[in-house]
Image: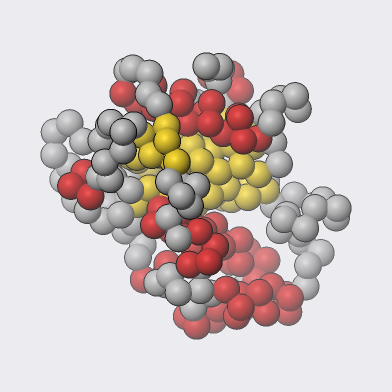
């Protein structure tokens, strides 16, 4: 398996630990850790994402791990008590490792008029508000309306990370709870031309799904 070199890490360090709540943590439990990397053009995004996840798991646990996927495509760590999530966005990959169910999403915010997935500054506020009304809860849509070009990608990445955590995927976006009501377990960060979100279940390892 290919190990992602530390020098490629987008934020200048191998792992950034993100605390999702302020509760005291029991000895031995991990905080959620997010790994980011830029991929060379010759590496397919899916392969790069899997390689990054395996690197992240090895970095956190100290030993090699294996992944399996459920019927909906959600990855799980074989025989372990760690959880992982992977996201790709046009040459950038993210992997989140946690002691609880976790989801991560990353999106590019640069201006690529040929790529409909990018959050373009040229897109009108009205379009973003209509998209919010289609996918988001009422309170989330009102929040987006105040500053659509900043807040739409913020809510989108938070909600997508949430439905990746649950395994529901985009089909569960409209029925998922408001991310504005769960600031303890949902995290969003803007970093240059990137925005990424991470969601964790509020309970710990007792929710582990057995695989392998």
Q: Nearer the viewer, residue 39 or 151?
A: 39
As displayed, is residue 108 above or below residue 140? above
Is residue 20 something one can see in this rendering? yes
Tell me the residue at 60%/80% (across/down). 133
- Rendered residue at 43%/70% (across/down): 176
Q: Indicate left or right for 58 with 153 as reference.
A: left
The image quadrant where one finds the C terminus is top left
Locate residue 25, reporting x and y percent: 17, 42
Position of 133 compared to 54: left or right? right
x, y (%) of residue 5? 56, 17
Judged left or right of residue 22, residue 96 is: right
* In the rendered image, the vertical position of residue 53 relative to residue 1, given as above or below: below
* Front residue (pair 68, 181): 68
Q: Which residue occupies 28% across, 45% down?
A: 209
| Residue 192 seen from this side | no
Apparent side of residue 158 relative to residue 59 in the rendered image (left or right): right
**Residue at 33% over, 17% down:** 63
Colour scheme shown: secondary structure
The relative height of residue 36 versus residue 58 in the rendered view (above or below) is below
């Amino acid at each position: 398996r290919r190990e992602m070199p530390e020098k490629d890490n987008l934020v200048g360090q191998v792992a950034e630990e993100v605390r999702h709540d302020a509760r005291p943590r029991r000895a031995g439990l991990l905080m959620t850790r997010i790994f980011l990397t830029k991929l060379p053009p010759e590496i397919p995004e899916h392969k790069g994402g899997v390689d990054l996840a395996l690197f992240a798991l090895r970095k956190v646990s100290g030993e090699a791990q294996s992944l399996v996927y459920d019927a909906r495509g959600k990855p799980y760590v074989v025989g372990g008590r760690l959880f992982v999530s992977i996201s790709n966005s046009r040459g950038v990959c993210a992997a989140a490792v946690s002691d609880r169910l976790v989801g991560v999403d990353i999106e590019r915010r640069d201006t690529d008029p040929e790529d409909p997935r990018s959050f373009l500054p040229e897109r009108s506020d009205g379009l973003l508000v209509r998209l919010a009304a289609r996918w988001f809860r009422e309170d989330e849509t009102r929040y987006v309306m105040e500053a659509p070009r900043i807040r739409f990608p913020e809510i989108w990445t938070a909600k997508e990370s949430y439905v990746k955590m649950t395994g529901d995927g985009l089909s569960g976006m409209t029925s998922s709870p408001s991310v504005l009501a769960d600031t303890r377990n949902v995290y969003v960060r803007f970093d240059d031309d990137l925005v990424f979100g991470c969601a964790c279940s509020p309970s710990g390892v007792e929710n582990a799904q057995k695989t392998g």
